[in-house]
Image: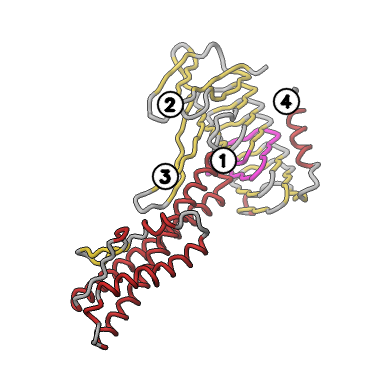
Amino acid sequence: MNRQIDIEFAIAAILDSDQQELHLISELDPERGHIRVRDENVLIRGKSIGKHHIECTESIIIDASIDGGISQPGRIEAMNEAIITGDAFNQHVTAHTIRIGGRAVDCRLEALGDIVVQGNLIESHVVLGDMGICRAELQQWEGQIRRRVEQHELMDRQIARDANNLRKVCDSASFNLNLAVGRLIQHEAKGLKVDLTFFYEQVKDKSEDDVRIALNEFYNRGIVGVIARTNRSYFAGSPANERLFTKALSSLRQLVFSVYKRDVLEGEIVRCREGFDEYLTRYRRPNRNLQVRGNLSSGSKVDFLFPYLEIDEEGCATVESRVIRLSILAGEQGTVLRQTHPDGSESSAQARGELKAVQISLHGDDETATVRTVPLR
């Protein structure tokens, strides 16, 4: 397909959309600062030179060439498509897909999907599989897990204090709260340990509401009954001892239900992590392409990202990417293609002639894949 027609089709698809309004900007004037546009496509008509930053929740069309100048690069962020019909100089572009109708010089192009450069790609860094446009969702996932982890830590400390205090009461009053069945309640050096594993095995097929009701019945009929029979000689005939024992049982009840709430929270953390990892799995795919229909010059590099969930020492979740990189280098006998694998190992190949009108993609299903550079038809 003719490259101009290709760009025109992409622009027409955006402009013909009846889902979003069109926001018109004559040019990106550096004096305007950071421009944010929500729920509208953006069309910029005039050539822009100098520092600029435009952010859009839909698509951005720049119907001209654009130059970031000699200082910091121009910044373009679009949740959907970013299209520049002319040349792009010193630009940092982040979008779902990127199309540049002319050259890309000294640019950083980051896309979750594909990138097409109709002209030459010169001294630029291309990133495929970048999740920059998903950062709000990533932060939401990370925040959900972090808040639960912080709650879990607070509850852990409170449970430890309550268990230690209750153990001291038991030792000073000489009664025993051990419950051997299922090792539910055990006296330990640092306090009482409550382990509800045995109880959870009995109610594993019940709903959360039913489990809460069952725990209440289990405590009143099971735990209290057994402990009361075990310590009957302590409080029988002594109202003062009976009041102390009743107070200890009330503290034990609070401890048991605090452990249950902490365990529920722990389950939520596990499910959140699993959901987050499942969300990332959708983007952990190799079928993304870079098309350069002009010359692919030495000095550029192409990264393929594979996002993975990392759990830190505190239990919080962050996203880390494993990277397959293709570096285009100038060698003594022509252009050299060097692939760097996620484990740091490298492999190199000599290009056959100049790299012109090529597609770069991965051959394989995961981060062990190899980079392929093939001619465009």
Up/down of 357 relative to 111, above or below: above
Sort mark 3 into few (<14), some (14-19) or many (20+) by Cα contacts within 10 Å: some
Q: Position of residue 267 (x, y in %)?
A: 44, 55
Of marks 3 and 2, which one's residue comes earlier in the chain?
3
Q: Position of residue 12 (x, y in %)?
A: 79, 37
Residue with the mark numbered 1: 92
Q: CA distance from mark 3 to mark 1?
A: 27 Å
Residue type (three-letter) at the residue carrying disc 1: His
Mark whose residue sits in front, 3 or 1: 3
Magenta residues (range): 68-96
Mark whose residue sits in front, 2 or 1: 2
Q: Position of residue 21 (x, y in %)?
A: 77, 51
Membership of 209 in magenta stretch: no
* Colouring scheme, one of rainbow, by chain, secondary structure, one colour: secondary structure
Q: CA distance from mark 4 to mark 2?
A: 31 Å
**Image quadrant of residue 15?**
top right
Q: CA distance from mark 4 to mark 3?
A: 41 Å
Residue with the mark numbered 3: 310
**Image quadrant of residue 101?**
top right
Q: CA distance from mark 2 to mark 1?
A: 23 Å
Residue type (three-letter) at the residue carrying disc 3: Glu
Up/down of 154 relative to 166, above or below: above
Mark whose residue sits in front, 3 or 2: 3
Of the 4 image quadrants, the one containing the N terminus is: top right
Up/down of 35 relative to 306, above or below: below
The circle drawn on residue 3 is 4
* Tags 4 and 3 touching, CB below 8 Å: no
Residue with the mark numbered 2: 340
